[in-house]
């Protein structure tokens, strides 16, 4: 395990032919990933706890007549699918960024206190302000996630050396423990608070207000843009801060940009869907098997494969206990934990 936590190494120099083969392999893999996402989208729209014929699904998408079955497909299922895509892409890219920032392939976006900040803000909103509806949770959760990330980053920035990966991790773990403890205390004291936030805290992309995906899209796009700008600098500091400075990189600026991107991406996703575990941890860790240590490719693959995993987990949750459903937040650990164990035990884990 100690070897799995070693800093990610920079890609070795490659001959033109080797570089061309690697690029071709990555492009082919990306094509397969996009195909997987498209299949997941089709399944998410076509399959539900209410089993409907495929011709009804197609008619609902192309010529809806306002019937209950058509409204279920063109409304609820499409909105749910769009939210799954946006949330999955956000968490996948955020997970890749935090693993690059901490140089730890087993790091999770929650390291920066995003989930804890969002959960604390929602608990406070319910207990103090009497918030009752999901659409009212969104601004509180987003602000809590962003403020939580900012507090962790500023606290880790104190002292010599600034916000080093180890310091960010330690401060984030401590901050998360404190906020989660306070949140659980408030929920236990006020049972009504616990009942109201239990469904949000389970992590789900269903029963969200119409247009939730569009509401968080501007923040997600801003986070993706920040992530794209940080991709090349992350490659430069893969061997350490000194290596980055040697090529003229402003390491502090890069770290700050990554924290902003993670706060926007993970904050938006957590506000909309609640805490979803294993997405940001498992997907970036897995795609290294396909991409190698180049963060530009890792970010792209994560943005495509993470929403596919979220949608497939959501579809599986609809089918296991028909006519009821299991939330995607319940399904992700059931899927992610075994996969992650296999990855960590794999023979190539030392290369990750």
Image: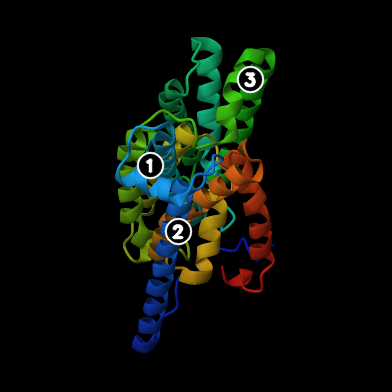
Q: Nearer the viewer, mark 2 or mark 3?
A: 2
| Residue at screen point 44% across, 40% down | 77
- Callout 3 crowding tier (Cα within 10 Å): few <14, some 14–19, many ≥20: many
Q: Which of the numbered marks, if any, corresponds to residue 194? A: 3
Q: CA distance from mark 2 to mark 3?
A: 37 Å
Split into 4 quadrants, where in the image is the N terminus? bottom right
Choose the circle earlier in sequence order: 2 or 1. Answer: 2
- Callout 1 crowding tier (Cα within 10 Å): few <14, some 14–19, many ≥20: some
Split into 4 quadrants, where in the image is the C terminus? bottom right
Q: Nearer the viewer, mark 2 or mark 1?
A: 2
Residue 165: x percent and y percent? 52, 51
Q: CA distance from mark 3 to mark 1?
A: 30 Å
Residue 195 versus residue 153 in the image, above or below = above
Q: Quadrant of residue 16?
A: bottom left
Residue 199: x percent and y percent? 58, 28
Closer to the camera in the image, 79 or 145: 79
Choose the circle earlier in sequence order: 3 or 1. Answer: 3
| Cβ atoms at labels 2 and 3 below 8 Å apart | no
């Amino acid at each position: 395990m100690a070897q799995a936590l070693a800093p990610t190494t920079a890609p070795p120099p490659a001959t033109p032919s080797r570089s061309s083969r690697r690029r071709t392999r990555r492009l082919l893999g990306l094509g397969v990933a996009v195909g997987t996402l498209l299949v997941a989208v089709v399944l998410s729209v076509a399959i539900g706890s209410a089993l409907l014929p495929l011709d009804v699904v197609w008619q609902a998408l192309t010529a809806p007549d306002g019937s209950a079955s058509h409204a279920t497909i063109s409304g609820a299922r499409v909105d749910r699918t769009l939210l799954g895509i946006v949330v999955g892409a956000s968490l996948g890219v955020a997970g890749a960024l935090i693993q690059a920032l901490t140089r730890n392939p087993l790091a999770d976006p929650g390291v920066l206190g995003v989930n804890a900040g969002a959960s604390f803000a929602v608990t406070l909103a319910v207990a103090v302000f009497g918030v009752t509806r999901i659409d009212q949770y969104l601004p509180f959760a987003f602000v809590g996630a962003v403020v939580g990330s900012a507090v962790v980053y500023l606290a880790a920035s104190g002292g010599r050396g600034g916000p080093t990966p180890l310091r960010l991790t330690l401060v984030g773990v401590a901050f998360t423990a404190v906020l989660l403890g306070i949140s659980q205390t408030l929920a236990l004291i006020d049972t009504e608070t616990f009942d109201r936030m239990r469904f949000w805290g389970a992590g789900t992309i269903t029963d969200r207000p119409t247009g939730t995906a569009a509401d968080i899209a501007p923040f997600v796009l801003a986070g993706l843009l920040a992530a794209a700008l940080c991709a090349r600098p992350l490659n430069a500091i893969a061997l350490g801060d000194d290596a980055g400075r040697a090529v003229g990189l402003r390491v502090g600026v890069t770290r700050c940009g990554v924290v902003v991107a993670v706060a926007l991406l993970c904050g938006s996703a957590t506000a909309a869907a609640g805490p979803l575990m294993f997405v940001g941890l498992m997907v970036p860790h897995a795609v290294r098997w396909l991409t190698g240590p180049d963060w530009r490719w890792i970010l792209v693959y994560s943005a495509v494969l993470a929403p596919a995993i979220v949608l497939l987990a959501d579809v599986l949750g609809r089918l296991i206990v028909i006519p009821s459903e299991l939330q995607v937040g319940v399904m992700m650990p059931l899927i992610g934990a075994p996969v992650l164990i296999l990855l960590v035990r794999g023979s190539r884990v030392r290369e990750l």
